[in-house]
Image (cartoon, rainbow, N blue to C red):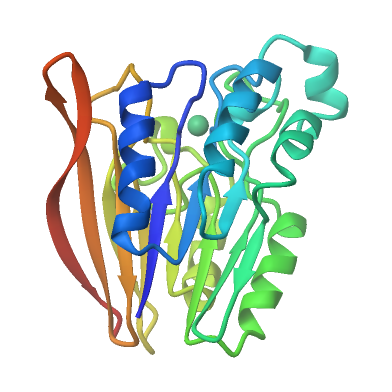
């Protein structure tokens, strides 16, 4: 069995230090084999925030798979957003995380669904490009691993379908291909826990979202993260939510859901 931690929307710069400390304490105790960070490490893409995020990742022992989010490009530096939106992220994170991971049992690939700028008003929304998706889909298709996992920041399938903040461009077009290739799809952005199944005929693929990990300003849901136990027949999804404890917050296990793969 492999145990994976799924976190997203860390938003360093706006983080709750008590939640960061609690997560780092829990991780070794939980016996996590690999950590997936599904984008939005920072709040505004500043160097100070990336330094905080790098310190956090440096404190994690297992391998980390990382994909960018829309908050990971410099917020107010339009020139950088147009010409080199991910340079800061890449230089700060290179020593601590990779875009993929594979061992005998699982294979994780990522792709970038965020953009520095777009031809639409809301630049925070996601985009799937055939070109960026091609290499991870090929790698997963050819992988001998029993469990193939894809991660991106923006939702591909979610309970919001393709409305509101879940308007990921071309997601409806690529969702079925992704479901047929990946057994598990891990995303962030919505600050919402969910698990959506897709029956491909041969098996069930699961699209899983997670709340913000550490943000001090939460939307409808408490901050939280997922631990996912991977076996050949099912995924056990353990959900953790932040709870108030005096003037601090800590994570608490709030539920376990079995996601059948057959
Ligand atoms: Fe986001």
Percent across and percent down for residue 157 are: 40, 53
Q: Which quadrant of the rendered structure holds the N terminus?
A: bottom left
Percent across and percent down for residue 143 are: 63, 84
The quarter of the picture where residue 31 lies is bottom left
The foreground one among 160 and 77 is 77
Residue at 42% from the left image edge and 43% from the top image edge: 162
The quarter of the picture where residue 216 lies is top left
Residue at 32% from the left image edge and 82% from the top image edge: 231
Residue at 60% from the left image edge and 30% from the top image edge: 70
Residue at 11% from the left image edge and 17% from the top image edge: 246
Q: Would you say 111 lies left or right of 177 here?
A: right
The foreground one among 10 and 197 is 10
Percent across and percent down for residue 25 are: 33, 43
Vertical comparison of 235 with 123: above or below: below
Q: Would you say 41 lies left or right of 50 here?
A: left
Vertical comparison of 208 with 215: above or below: below
């Amino acid at each position: 069995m492999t145990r994976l931690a799924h976190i997203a929307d860390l938003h360093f710069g706006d983080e709750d230090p008590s939640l960061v400390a609690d997560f780092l304490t829990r991780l070794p105790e939980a016996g996590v084999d690999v950590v997936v960070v599904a984008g939005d490490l920072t709040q505004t893409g500043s160097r100070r925030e990336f330094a905080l995020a790098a310190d956090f990742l440096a404190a994690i022992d297992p391998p980390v798979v990382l994909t960018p989010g829309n908050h990971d490009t410099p917020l107010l530096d339009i020139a950088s957003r147009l010409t080199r939106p991910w340079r800061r992220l890449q230089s700060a994170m290179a020593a601590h995380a990779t875009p993929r991971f594979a061992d005998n049992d699982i294979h994780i690939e990522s792709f970038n669904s965020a953009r520095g700028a777009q031809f639409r008003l809301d630049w925070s929304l996601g985009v799937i490009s055939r070109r960026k998706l091609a290499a991870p889909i090929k790698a997963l298709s050819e992988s001998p691993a029993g469990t193939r996992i894809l991660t991106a920041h923006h939702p591909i399938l979610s309970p919001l379908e393709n409305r509101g903040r879940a308007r990921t461009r071309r997601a409806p077009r690529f969702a079925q291909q992704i479901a047929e290739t990946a057994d598990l799809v891990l995303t962030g952005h919505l600050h919402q826990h969910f698990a959506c199944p897709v029956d491909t005929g041969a098996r069930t693929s699961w699209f899983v979202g997670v709340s913000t990990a550490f943000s001090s300003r939460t939307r409808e849901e408490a901050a939280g993260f997922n631990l996912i136990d991977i076996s050949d027949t099912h995924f056990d999804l353990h959900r953790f939510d932040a709870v108030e404890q005096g003037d601090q917050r800590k994570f608490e296990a709030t539920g376990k859901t079995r996601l059948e793969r057959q």
